[in-house]
Image (tube, grey):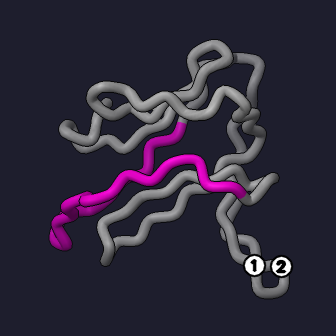
Amino acid sequence: MTPQLGYWTVERSGDEFNALTAPQTPLPLSLKLQKLGVYLDYEEGQLSFYNVETRSHIYTFTDIELNPKEKLYPLLWTVDINTSLVLESPVSAGDKTHIAV
């Protein structure tokens, strides 16, 4: 599931997080995620992941070539049977807007 195949993905493997680039890009070992934010800048061709709780940037895929005639389908899942995946709509708190996953 790499960008070359049309997937822009981050994963957790044990205590490590990686951006699934080719080769994989290790993310900080201090990363402890509970809520993941995802932001797509269609016009700039960028997809960014954020830690919602700390409001910190995790990783941005750049130079994404999107075809305006094709639909985009978000794919979200967890393989941990003890973890629930909850999707939240954009939340506005004053001047702050985010999407939590």
Drawn side of residue 49 relative to residue 94, left or right:
left
User: Decide: marks 1, 2 in contact (CB < 8 A)?
Assistant: yes
Q: Residue at x 75, y 33 (%)?
A: 32
Outermost residue on the bottom side: it is 95
Residue 87 appears anywhere in the view: no
**Residue 75 location, quadrant:** top left
* Quarter of the rendering occupied by the N terminus: top left
Q: Is residue 20 above or below residue 57?
A: above
Tell me, yes or no, whether the highlighted magenta stretch contains residue 31. Answer: no
Provide the secondary structure element on which disc 1 rests.
Answer: strand
Residue closer to the observer: 98 or 18: 18
Q: Residue at x 32, y 41 (%)?
A: 7
Q: Is residue 53 above or below residue 30?
A: below
**Residue 96 location, quadrant:** bottom right
Residue pointed to by mark 2 = 93
Drawn side of residue 33 relative to residue 76, left or right:
right
**Residue 6 location, quadrant:** top left
Q: Residue at x 52, y 40 (%)?
A: 76
Which amino acid type is shown beneath numbered disc 1? Answer: Lys
Residue pointed to by mark 1 = 96
Residue 44 at x, y percent in the picture: 32, 73
